Amino acid sequence: MSSIPEPISAGSLLMASTDLVEPTFRRSVIYVIEHNDAGSLGLVLNRMSQTAVHNLLPEWTDTVARPKAIYIGGPVKQDSALCLGVIKPGADVDNIPALRSVEGSVVLVDLDADAEELGESLVGVRIFAGYAGWGIGQLGDELMSGSWIVAPSLPADVLAPAEVDLWSQVLRRQPWPLPMLSTHPIELERN
């Protein structure tokens, strides 16, 4: 792997390196929503909670992708929710104030909006409790230390089912030698 990190922008994925074994981020896949001079913000795509969407936001149950659970977006502000969605082909985000474009067909969704009305423009949504955040320069330092691998995202990553090992799946579609990491054991001590 290169010692110079790939550029990051909204829509990039941060893949936990095999050396990042801290439980909060071990084998995590983070979708970057914002990355600028003030810091970075993202959502962990592969940490499903045991809380069903219908228990907290019943109006979103029909719009949320399966499994219909709240996901843990990160360790910051877990008492608040953010929502990512994938728009249907041909949907015009510019005319829907409750949707804010992030990258390509991925949007931030206002959870105070009418879920049924927005559902007509969305393939599906994923609701996250909390987020991952980095202050000025913090993510750059973590990238230089090798904690994260930067990868491009696909809209399907945002709505990936819980049974998919998203970390391995994303690594397998990267240039050589990154696909080799996709077979790295979850618990090295058991290998």
Image (spheres, rainbow, N blue to C red):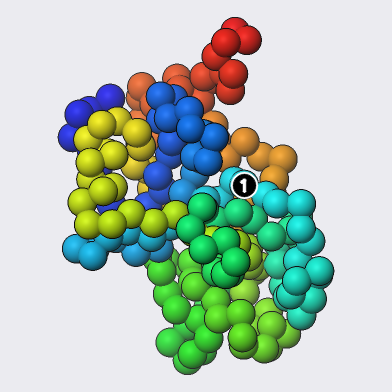
Per the image, label 1 sits on a secondary structure element best described as loop
- Where's residue 127, x and y in %? 63, 65
- Where's residue 10, x and y in %? 35, 61
Residue 154 drawn above or below residue 108 = above
Give the quadrant of the N terminus: top left
Foreground pick, 38 / 33: 38
* Horizontal relation, residue 68 to residue 88: left or right: right
Residue 15 drawn above or below residue 72 = above
- Where's residue 39, x and y in %? 27, 60
- Where's residue 57, x and y in %? 74, 75
- The residue under label 1 is 47
Picture residue at 54% right of the left edge, 35% below the top: 23
Picture residue at 52% right of the left edge, 19% below the top: 184
Q: Residue furthest top?
A: 191
Residue 40 seen in this snapshot: yes
Picture residue at 59% right of the left edge, 18% below the top: 187
* Horizontal relation, residue 179 to residue 5: left or right: right
Residue 155 seen in this snapshot: no
Q: Quadrant of residue 135?
A: bottom left
Picture residue at 22% right of the left edge, 28% below the top: 2
* Horizontal relation, residue 175 to residue 164: left or right: left
* Horizontal relation, residue 119 to residue 54: left or right: left
Disc 1 marks a residue whose amino acid type is Arg
Foreground pick, 189 / 2: 189
Give the quadrant of the C terminus: top right
